[in-house]
Amino acid sequence: MECILIGLIMKAIVWTKYGPPEVLQLKDVEKPTPKDNEVLIKIHATTVTAGDCEMRRMKTALKFRYLMRAYVGLRRPTRITKLGMELAGEIESVGKDVTLFKKGDQVFAATGFIGMGAWAEYICLPEKSENPEKPEGVILAIKPTNMTYEEATAVPVGGLEALDYIRQGNIQSGQKVLINGAGGTIGSFAVQLAKHYGAEVTAVDSTNKLDMLRSIGADHVIDYTQEDFAKSGETYDYILDIVGKISSSRAKKTLKSTGLYLNVIKGTGVKPKLEDLLFIKELIEAGKIKSVIDRSYPLEQTVEANMYVETGEKTGHVIISMGDSF
């Protein structure tokens, strides 16, 4: 009987209250069982993003904060107690109604806001989203064949958001694009996607990220701690401000007459779509896009991973690895 009980337990990072990284605790919790339309995934890798940290602190934009607290829990998290919004792993079992996946499939996924829960050894997800047109929708697909689990887990959230923002720019070949905050989760994919669409890309970020940005295709890099791009005299067809630090007046000074400025922080949520993830997967398998991994931590060091992400110094992605990713 004891062996059976042990088999029903998994390790997970439990979100106990709103606050600093220390509110996260490694605990033994019940291993989930898939419903008829769900798959049980053994997670090999997940990520810690700035969005996860904002959620943990409940320091999101004011227009979302009260709605999120109302859903998650007013005083402390109750409806959602495990964070983490993207993962890569292997399907361990499937519900009786599942037709798209089978045991042993190697997958990657975005859990959506309603689900979350990727900071754990296992997760159950529906085989297809019940809300495909909403930001909380689950996106699940077979992972790229040329990526490890650690590389693949970085794609579903940052990759989908980057694709949406780049497409909003309606970039034409030869146009000039500036990406502010280019060295992070979204930006590292946005640079590569902008290049895919034929743009001449200027990437803006801090000193330690410039070499990486050059390595993924940025034509020009600007260290914002040393130089103000708005004083260079250059003009752009599209300015993508991922960190929301460029005022609209500064943007106007550097935009061409027909140019577009997008402030991600003030925008609406991205609606993830399976076909978009599959499009990115094709680019990855064609060798046109890659993940940029900064550091990898074991699950038991998720607190330390959160601390590092909050320094703002990460380059690309911070990964939580379960230790069996290769």
Image: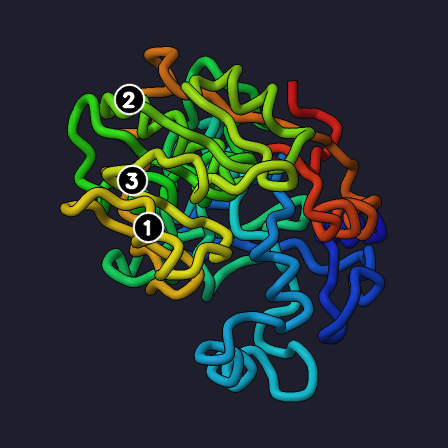
Task: Give me the disc on residue 135.
Answer: none
Name the residue type under label 3.
Answer: Ile
Distance of mark 1 from mark 2, alpha carbons? 27 Å
| Snapshot quadrant of residue 51 | bottom right
Name the residue type under label 1.
Answer: Lys
- Name which of mark 1 and mark 3 comes first in the sequence: 3
- Residues under numbered marks 1 and 2 in contact, where contact means CB atoms less than 8 Å apart: no
Circle 3: element type: helix
Relative to 13, 135 lies left or right:
left
| Snapshot quadrant of residue 134 | bottom left
Foreground pick, 204 / 17: 204
Q: Which residue is mark 2?
A: 196
Q: Position of residue 234 (x, y in %)?
A: 34, 34
Q: Position of residue 258 (x, y in %)?
A: 14, 46
Q: Position of residue 132 (x, y in %)?
A: 26, 56
Relative to 180, 318 lies left or right:
right
- Say which residue appears at 64% left-offset and 47% top-offset: 48
Q: Which residue is mark 1?
A: 253
User: How is this picture coloured?
Assistant: rainbow
- Say which residue appears at 42% left-offset and 60% top-offset: 247
- Name which of mark 1 and mark 2 comes first in the sequence: 2
Q: Nearer the viewer, mark 1 or mark 2?
A: 1
Mark 3: give few (<14), some (14-19) or many (20+) Cα within 10 Å.
Answer: many
Relative to 297, 176 lies left or right:
left
Relative to 324, 142 lies left or right:
left
Q: Which residue is mark 3?
A: 166
Circle 1: element type: helix
